[in-house]
Amino acid sequence: MARRRIPMPSATEIRKLADGDGRLALRATPNASADAILLPSDAASLELLVRTTATAEGGKANDAILRLLADALGQPVSSIELLRGETARTKLVRIGPPRG
């Protein structure tokens, strides 16, 4: 069965949430019904919402989240680093500069 995908925000919209050092706060939801990246619904929040169908077991959700984010940004997974929150729902990642 194919995984359902919800349209993702643009790379520009995602990058606007990162600080000057490329750090981006995420709120992760493993075991979701579909893979998705959603912009914060609250204008005061800077946390990107990332849902993945992967389970949180053995780092699978973290890997899936980094792949989803890389895909949305149009850059390799190796350019994204998980800085904090390996076992938490709230995570901090560093994204590399845009390609090109």
Image (spheres, rainbow, N blue to C red):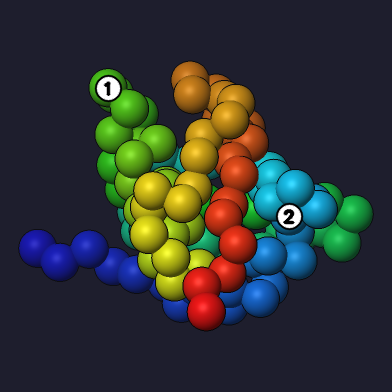
With 86 as the anchor, is 98 left or right in this view? Answer: right
N-terminal-most mark, 1 or 2: 2
Q: In this rendering, would 37 be left or right of 40? A: left
Q: Nearer the viewer, residue 79 or 37?
A: 79
Q: Position of residue 63 (x, y in %)?
A: 34, 40
Q: Residues within 10 Å of mark 1 (few under 14, many from 20)?
A: few
Mark carried by residue 18: 2
Secondary structure beneath dot 2 equals loop
Q: Position of residue 88 (x, y in %)?
A: 55, 23
Kind of residue indicated by mark 2: Ala
Q: Determine the residue located farthest toward the left in the rendered image.
A: 1
Label 2 crowding class (10 Å Cα cut-off): few <14, some 14-19, many 20+? some
Residue 16, given in percent of the width and then of the height, sits at: 76, 66
* Residue identifier under label 1: 58
- Check the image and name the residue furthest to the front: 100
Which structural element holds mark 1? helix
Quadrant in which residue 89 is drawn? top right
Amino acid on which the number 1 mark rests in the picture: Gly
Measured Cα–Cα span from mark 1 to mark 2: 27 Å
